[in-house]
Image: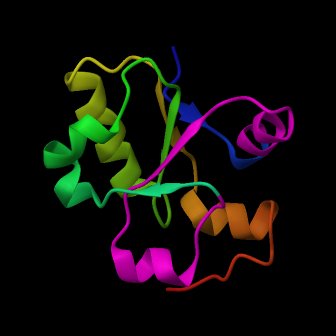
């Protein structure tokens, strides 16, 4: 099973109306700069204390700036018994470049 999803695949699934929990694991200042509509911010460092906000039955797609922190989040959630979790390849940077140029890019 692949624990990764491309920005194009995510966009297609959201457009179809699929229910996906978008987990943003960046820091609050990053979230205030740019976010994917409908996402929930739980910074990676607070994820262990914030597990009650997540439903193990949901399909969860984690994202960060470029995909590194969200890969760590996916690994952590898999260890906690979550099975339906995916990392957004390329993060919000790829989302801005390939899907929605109105989402600001930052460094």
Residue in the foreground of this view, choosing between 11 and 53:
53
Judge left or right: residue 24 versus residue 39: left
Judge left or right: residue 14 versus residue 75: right
- Residue 95 in percent (x, y) is at 69, 61
Q: Does the magenta stretch include residue 15?
A: yes
Instruction: Magenta stretch: give its range.
Output: 9-37
In this figure, which colouring scheme has been used for the structure?
rainbow
Residue 12, above or below 100? above
- Looking at the rendering, which quadrant does residue 98 occupy? bottom right
- At horizontal 26% and vertical 56% (from top left) the residue drawn is 44
- Looking at the rendering, which quadrant does residue 10 occupy? top right
- At horizontal 49% and vertical 86% (from top left) the residue drawn is 107
- At horizontal 67% and vertical 83% (from top left) the residue drawn is 104
Judge left or right: residue 71 versus residue 3: left
- Residue 88 in percent (x, y) is at 56, 46
- At horizontal 53% and vertical 26% (from top left) the residue drawn is 59
Q: What count of labels does the image hold? A: 0
Residue in the foreground of this view, choosing between 10 and 2:
10
Question: Please, which residue is most extreme toward the left here?
Answer: 49
Judge left or right: residue 25 versus residue 33: left
Q: Is residue 96 magenta?
A: no
- Residue 57 in percent (x, y) is at 44, 17
Residue 75, above or below 84? below
């Amino acid at each position: 099973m692949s624990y990764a999803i491309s920005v194009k695949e995510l966009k297609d699934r959201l457009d179809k109306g699929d229910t996906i929990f978008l987990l943003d694991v960046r820091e609050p200042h990053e979230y205030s700069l740019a976010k994917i509509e409908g996402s929930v911010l739980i910074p990676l460092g607070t994820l262990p204390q914030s597990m009650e906000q997540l439903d193990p039955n949901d399909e969860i797609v984690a994202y960060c700036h470029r995909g590194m922190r969200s890969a760590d989040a996916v690994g952590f959630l898999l260890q906690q018994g979550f099975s339906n979790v995916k990392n957004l390849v390329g993060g919000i940077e790829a989302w801005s470049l390939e899907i929605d140029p109105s989402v600001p890019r930052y460094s």
